[in-house]
Amino acid sequence: MQTASHIILSQEIIERKLQRMAYEVYERNEEASRIILAGIADRGTVVARKIESLLKQIAPFEVIFTEIQINKAHPLTCSWQPRVPFENEVVIVVDDVANTGRTLFYAMKPFMEAIPAALQTLVLIDRQHKAFPVHIDYTGYSLATTLQEQIFVKTEGDQIIHAYIQ
């Protein structure tokens, strides 16, 4: 049985939310000389690239992008490329949707090999069903759903088309 889906964020609204989050990142980290955006593949990478582009337009600090590869079903090991030095740097781990917090929790693991200046999180949508000790620092849209409902972000290439609930 296929369940109905409902669009909760249009492309236009998503663009506004990304713009707002980019300004929040800038304001909170204005003293930094550079920040590292670590996007969780695949859709978190698209969100991170959007934030990177916006920050490069408004912020004086250097923005470095890296991608985290993680098996969301078995997240105990993950890798990131390119590997960039992050000690005493601001690192922001980025994903599209935060459900239980498990993916974000394990995606932060590589950044515990040294001591960053700050380790922050950014998600486009926060579902508020945390089962792991993860705090979301920057949220585009926060909503409470039933445990049976799922949130999806549709992307095409480097574009975020919309977000929907099913």
Image (spheres, helix red, strand yellow):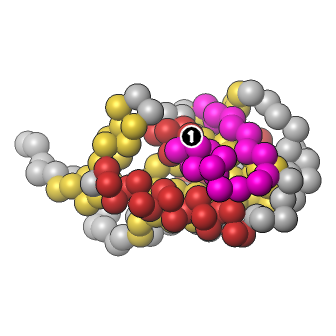
Residue 41 image-quadrant placement:
top right
Q: Is residue 43 visible?
A: yes
Lateral position of residue 4 relative to residue 69, left or right: left
Q: Looking at the image, which is closer to me, 55 or 110?
A: 55
Q: Is residue 163 visible?
A: no
Residue 128 image-quadrant placement:
bottom left
Q: Looking at the image, which is closer to me, 43 or 79?
A: 43
Lateral position of residue 116 relative to residue 14, left or right: right
Q: Residue furthest left?
A: 1
Q: Please say whether residue 115 is one of the residues in the magenta stretch.
A: no
Lateral position of residue 71 relative to residue 145, left or right: right
* Mark 1 residue crowding within 10 angstroms, few (<14) / some (14–19) / many (20+): many
Per the rendered image, the range of residues in magenta is 50-69
- Residue type beneath disc 1: Arg
Measured as percent of width and height from the top left, residue 153 is found at 35, 46
Q: Name which residue lies at 65% across and 56% down.
A: 58
Measured as percent of width and height from the top left, residue 32 is found at 84, 59
Q: Name which residue lies at 66% across and 43% down.
A: 38
Relative to residue 91, is residue 29 depicted above or below? below
Measured as percent of width and height from the top left, residue 53 is found at 58, 43
Q: Please say whether residue 62 is one of the residues in the magenta stretch.
A: yes
> Looking at the image, how many numbered discs can be counted on the residues?
1
Q: Name which residue lies at 62% across and 67% down.
A: 24
Task: Kindly state the secondary structure of the residue where label 1 is placed.
Answer: helix
Measured as percent of width and height from the top left, residue 129 is found at 44, 67
Q: Name which residue lies at 85% across and 44% down.
A: 86
Quadrant that contains the N terminus: top left
Which residue is the site of mark 1? 49
